[in-house]
Amino acid sequence: MEDHKKTYFWNAVWLAILTVIEVFAIDMGLPRTGLIVLLLSITVTKILLVAMVYMHLRYETKTLRRLIFLPIPLALYFLWGVMYDSAFDWTL
């Protein structure tokens, strides 16, 4: 059996690193679309880290994991629409 404390520690470290990158991503000087893609990819990575480690999904069957992660592509599709919409200036 693997040491779970070590797994939880390194997962927390990676989540903290990704959070710091998210916070400082605004100052990176990326174009708006690039910033949105970066933040979405970091968010999906953090979702997967939390689900696989803290929700113990890495020990479940492949069918259950696929069923749980099925909504993520749908959410990304809707967020792609938000990214498309963000190019327009909707201020009146």
Image (tube, grey):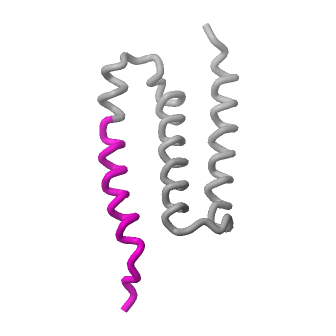
Please report the bounds of the magenta region as a residue range: 70-92
Q: Residue drawn 31% across and 20% down?
A: 63
The secondary structure that most of the magenta stretch takes on is: helix
Q: Is residue 79 magenta?
A: yes
Q: Give the total number of marks visible in the rendering.
A: 0
Q: Quadrant of the N terminus?
A: top right
The quadrant in which residue 24 appears is bottom right
Above or below for 22 versus 62: below
Q: Position of residue 36 (x, y in %)?
A: 49, 60
Q: Is residue 48 left or right of residue 71?
A: right
Q: Give the farthest residue toward the bottom.
A: 92
Q: Residue drawn 47% across and 29% down?
A: 55
Q: Is residue 33 magenta?
A: no
Above or below for 67 versus 26: above
Q: Position of residue 76 (x, y in %)?
A: 36, 50
The quadrant in which residue 12 appears is top right
Q: Quadrant of the C terminus?
A: bottom left
- Closer to us: 43 or 57: 43
Above or below for 25 versus 77: below
Q: Residue drawn 48% across and 44% down?
A: 44
Q: Residue drawn 32% across and 23% down?
A: 64
Q: Position of residue 45 (x, y in %)?
A: 52, 41
Above or below for 70 versus 88: above
